[in-house]
Each structure stands twice: as structure tokens, then as C-alpha cells.
Amino acid sequence: MAMDQIILFAALGIVAGILGWGVLTMARGGEYNIKNSNRIMRYRIIFQAIALVVILILIWWKRG
């Protein structure tokens, strides 16, 4: 597997992991959900932006 594919799958895996963490937190509810749901949502948005930048860099790198 090429290095660019590993980087791509790692970025997408991190986003999917944070998304799963948020879904489980909301499903569980309770005090943990109240205290951490907004923080988890911010983490997801930040890592989605990072993953998007990584994807765009990989596309640009492959074209060049």
C-alpha cells in the first residue's frame, strides 16, 4: 500500500473514530454527554477540516 493511501485512511479513520465516539456519547446520555458533547463535536469538525486539507494536498501532489 502506498504512503499516500495510508495517510488518507488514517485521516478518515480518525474522523470516523471521533464520529463514533460522539454517537456513543449521545446514545449513552447522562452527565458525560452533557459535559462533553460540544467538545467532541468541535474535535470532529477540526479533524474533518484537517482530513479535507490532507485529501486536497494528496490530490495536488498526485497531479504534480
Image (cartoon, rainbow, N blue to C red):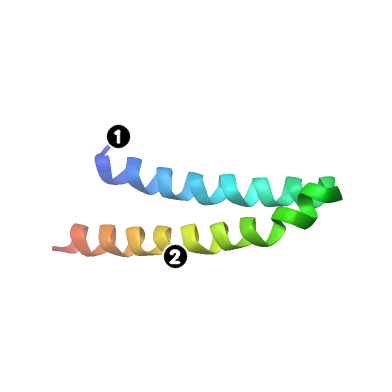
Q: Quadrant for residue 24, please give it.
A: top right
Q: Which residue is mark 1?
A: 1
- Disc 2 vs disc 1: Cβ atoms closer than 8 Å? no
User: The N terminus lies in which quarter of the figure?
Assistant: top left
> Hey, what amino acid is under mark 1?
Met
Side of 32 relative to 51 (left or right)? right
> Hey, what amino acid is under mark 2?
Ala
Q: Which residue is mark 2?
A: 49
Q: Residues within 10 Å of mark 1 (few under 14, many from 20)?
A: few
Q: Residue at x 33, y 58 (%)?
A: 54
- Of residue 15 and residue 59, the one placed in the foreground of this image is 15
Q: Find residue 18 and report its horizontal and vertical position in percent.
A: 59, 49
Side of 39 relative to 49 (left or right)? right
Q: Quadrant for residue 45, please give it.
A: bottom right
Query: Which SS class for mark 2?
Result: helix
Q: Residue at x 49, y 46 (%)?
A: 14
Q: Give residue 19's mark.
A: none
State the CA–CA distance, disc 2 to disc 1: 24 Å
Q: Find residue 56 and report its horizontal and vertical position in percent.
A: 32, 65
User: The C terminus lies in which quarter of the figure?
Assistant: bottom left
Q: Is residue 38 above or below residue 9?
A: below
- Of labels 2 and 1, earlier in sequence is 1
Q: Residue furthest top?
A: 1
